[in-house]
Image (cartoon, grey):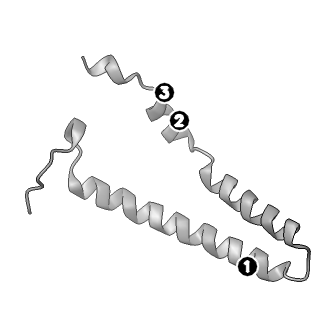
Amino acid sequence: MRTLAFGLPAGIEPSDLVFISKYVAIIAVVFAVIGILLLKRFAGRSISFMVAIVVAVFVLERVPQPAAQAIDATPALSQG
Protein backbone atom coordinates (compact mmCIF):
# COMPACT_ATOMS: atom_id res chain seq x y z
CA MET A 1 0.00 0.00 0.00
CA ARG A 2 1.21 3.47 -0.89
CA THR A 3 1.63 6.15 1.77
CA LEU A 4 -0.27 9.34 1.10
CA ALA A 5 1.39 12.72 1.41
CA PHE A 6 -1.36 13.79 3.80
CA GLY A 7 -2.97 12.08 6.75
CA LEU A 8 -6.65 11.28 6.93
CA PRO A 9 -8.43 12.33 10.13
CA ALA A 10 -9.89 10.03 12.80
CA GLY A 11 -8.19 6.86 11.60
CA ILE A 12 -9.92 6.81 8.22
CA GLU A 13 -8.12 4.48 5.86
CA PRO A 14 -7.94 4.95 2.08
CA SER A 15 -9.74 1.61 1.73
CA ASP A 16 -12.69 3.14 3.63
CA LEU A 17 -12.85 5.94 1.09
CA VAL A 18 -12.77 3.47 -1.80
CA PHE A 19 -15.58 1.42 -0.20
CA ILE A 20 -17.80 4.47 0.32
CA SER A 21 -16.97 5.90 -3.12
CA LYS A 22 -18.22 2.72 -4.81
CA TYR A 23 -21.63 3.04 -3.18
CA VAL A 24 -21.84 6.77 -3.87
CA ALA A 25 -21.01 6.14 -7.54
CA ILE A 26 -23.68 3.43 -7.80
CA ILE A 27 -26.30 5.69 -6.21
CA ALA A 28 -25.35 8.56 -8.54
CA VAL A 29 -25.71 6.32 -11.60
CA VAL A 30 -29.10 5.03 -10.42
CA PHE A 31 -30.45 8.55 -9.95
CA ALA A 32 -28.99 9.69 -13.27
CA VAL A 33 -30.71 6.80 -15.05
CA ILE A 34 -34.00 7.60 -13.29
CA GLY A 35 -33.70 11.22 -14.40
CA ILE A 36 -32.88 10.32 -17.99
CA LEU A 37 -35.76 7.83 -18.20
CA LEU A 38 -38.20 10.37 -16.76
CA LEU A 39 -37.03 13.06 -19.20
CA LYS A 40 -37.46 10.66 -22.13
CA ARG A 41 -40.90 9.64 -20.86
CA PHE A 42 -42.06 13.25 -20.61
CA ALA A 43 -40.23 14.58 -23.69
CA GLY A 44 -43.46 15.93 -25.22
CA ARG A 45 -44.23 18.09 -22.19
CA SER A 46 -43.21 21.67 -21.53
CA ILE A 47 -39.66 22.67 -20.67
CA SER A 48 -40.71 23.85 -17.21
CA PHE A 49 -42.15 20.40 -16.44
CA MET A 50 -38.88 18.73 -17.48
CA VAL A 51 -36.86 21.19 -15.38
CA ALA A 52 -39.13 20.34 -12.43
CA ILE A 53 -38.28 16.64 -12.94
CA VAL A 54 -34.55 17.42 -12.90
CA VAL A 55 -34.97 19.44 -9.71
CA ALA A 56 -37.04 16.68 -8.07
CA VAL A 57 -34.41 14.01 -8.86
CA PHE A 58 -31.69 16.30 -7.55
CA VAL A 59 -33.61 16.94 -4.31
CA LEU A 60 -34.30 13.21 -3.82
CA GLU A 61 -30.60 12.51 -4.29
CA ARG A 62 -29.72 15.04 -1.58
CA VAL A 63 -32.08 13.69 1.11
CA PRO A 64 -29.82 12.59 3.98
CA GLN A 65 -30.03 9.05 5.24
CA PRO A 66 -30.57 8.34 8.98
CA ALA A 67 -26.98 7.10 9.43
CA ALA A 68 -25.64 10.29 7.85
CA GLN A 69 -27.81 12.37 10.17
CA ALA A 70 -26.45 10.55 13.21
CA ILE A 71 -22.87 11.17 12.10
CA ASP A 72 -23.58 14.85 11.38
CA ALA A 73 -25.23 15.26 14.80
CA THR A 74 -22.07 14.13 16.61
CA PRO A 75 -20.28 17.18 18.06
CA ALA A 76 -16.90 17.75 16.43
CA LEU A 77 -15.25 18.77 19.70
CA SER A 78 -16.17 15.61 21.59
CA GLN A 79 -12.88 13.95 20.61
CA GLY A 80 -11.10 16.49 22.79
Residue that appears at 39% across and 65% down: 22
Residue that appears at 82% across and 70% down: 50
* Amino acid tagged 2: Gln
Circle 1 SS class:
helix
* Amino acid tagged 1: Leu
Residue at numbered disc 1: 37
Q: CA distance from mark 1 to mark 3?
A: 35 Å
Please report contact status of discs 1 and 2: CB closer than 8 Å, yes or no: no
Vertical side of 65 occupied by 35: above or below = below
Q: Nearer the viewer, residue 3 or 65?
A: 3
Q: Please state the total of marks drawn on the protein image.
A: 3
Residue 80 in picture, x, y percent from top left: 24, 16
Circle 2 SS class:
helix
- Which label was assigned to residue 80? none
Q: CA distance from mark 3 to mark 2?
A: 6 Å
Residue that appears at 33% across and 60% down: 19
Q: Is residue 80 left or right of residue 3?
A: right
Residue 39 in picture, x, y percent from top left: 77, 77
Residue that appears at 12% across and 55% down: 4
Label 2 crowd (10 A; few <14 / some 14-19 / many >=20) = few
Residue at numbered disc 3: 73
Residue at numbered disc 2: 69
